[in-house]
Image: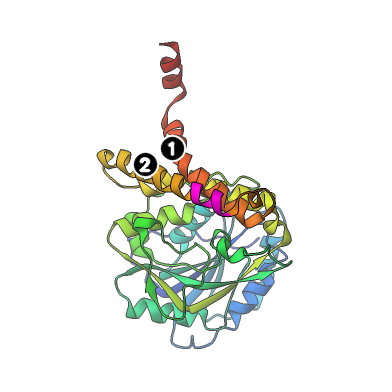
Amino acid sequence: MILEYSEPNFKSAVRLIDFTVAIRAYNSGSLLPTILDRLRFQIEVETIHWEVIVIDNNSTDNTAEIVKAYQIAWPETFPLRYYFEPRQGAGFARHRAIKEARGNLIGFLDDDNLPTDNWVAAACAFGKTHSRAGAYGSQIHGEFEVEPPKDFHRIQSFLAIKDRGSEPNLYDPAILSLPPGAGLVVRRQVWFDHVPPTQVLQGPVKESLTKKGEDFEALMHIGNAGWEIWYNPEMQISHQIPSWRLEKNYLVTLTRCAGLNTCYLRTLNVSSWQIPMIALRLMVGSFCRLIIHFFKHGSKIRTDTVAACEMEFFLSCFISPLYLFMKNIKLKDIIVIFSG
């Protein structure tokens, strides 16, 4: 059995360290060795007090055994710890990581994210020089198993591929300009203070993408609390993209689910009187983009994967206020409405 540590009390006298790398693992037996090897040989970390934790998000393969094998010969200078989180979903896994981490800064990596050899050092350095940064994201490059569809760059952000240039710059939560959860670093105390322990969006579960957007939901809470959210190009990771994630059906479903949750994210933490105006602006803007997109691409929308995904996203954004409204109405209310 792998030693599972009890949940620490954040307000206890346990001394925090500089940085925690938190890996979310789901059936990751084939992926974990590569990412753990990348972390084991990080450079420029001699003066950094850090650790690595693996959150096993309800795996049914040999993920636990892989971690156990690595723990045997893992360097003592930065511990490797393991926790099992039975509630499946990236949101649950990240909240578990926040609770178990001992670092003042916490860097999230998914099991298919490969950091460069200075990722930890770059993440720590940025946190020290940007004290108002509640969160900051990496530059993310795609490593594709097969060639992506033509013009894929137009929708690559849906697969957590992010390149905003060679200079640090601010994201804008007001327009849902936010970094993905892959390669994201957050301040532990900021998360504890502002992100609710149970999110509405918990991320993909098996084949379901309906709750995609868990990373944006957490970041909206942080941004709405007044903390800055940055892009740091010195932190670079490679995101391994298998062939099935480039298939048209998957991409269309992914963009549809992202669009349907747009109104919820846009209205997070706003006053109730503001919601109708935000919803109206979202519908008008999305309708205009739909019309422009249709006239620009026409019949290509049926055959072109990227054009089809963009159309699906604009359409889903357009109906997202109705989608949010219907989700918030209880079944008994619907019965009352239709029964008169």
Q: Which residues are magenta?
A: 290-296
The quadrant in which the N terminus is found is: bottom right
Whole-percent x, y for residue 135 in the image? 39, 67
Q: Quadrant of residue 272?
A: top left
* Mark positioned earlier in the residue sequence (2 or 1): 2
Q: Which residue is mark 1?
A: 324
> Is label 1 in a helix, a strand or a loop?
helix
Say left or right for 270 vs 252: left
Q: Amino acid at mark 2?
A: Ala
Query: Is the C terminus in the top left, top right, bottom left or bottom right quadrant?
Result: top left
- Residue 324 in percent (x, y) is at 43, 37
Residue 253 part of the magenta segment? no
**Looking at this view, is 258 or 183 the one in front?**
258
Q: Is residue 104 above or below residue 254?
A: below
Q: From this view, report whether residue 12 is shown above or below residue 212.
A: below
Q: State whether residue 66 appears in this view.
A: yes
Query: Which amino acid type is marked by label 1?
Result: Leu
Who's the residue at 70% across and 55% down the image?
A: 247
User: Comparing marks 2 and 1, which lies closer to the viewer?
Assistant: 2
Q: Which residue is mark 2?
A: 279
Is 117 situated left or right of 11 in this image? right
**Residue 87 visible in the snapshot:** no
Secondary structure, magenta segment, majority class: helix
Measured Cα–Cα span from mark 2 to mark 1: 10 Å
Label 2 close to label 1 by CB (< 8 Å): yes
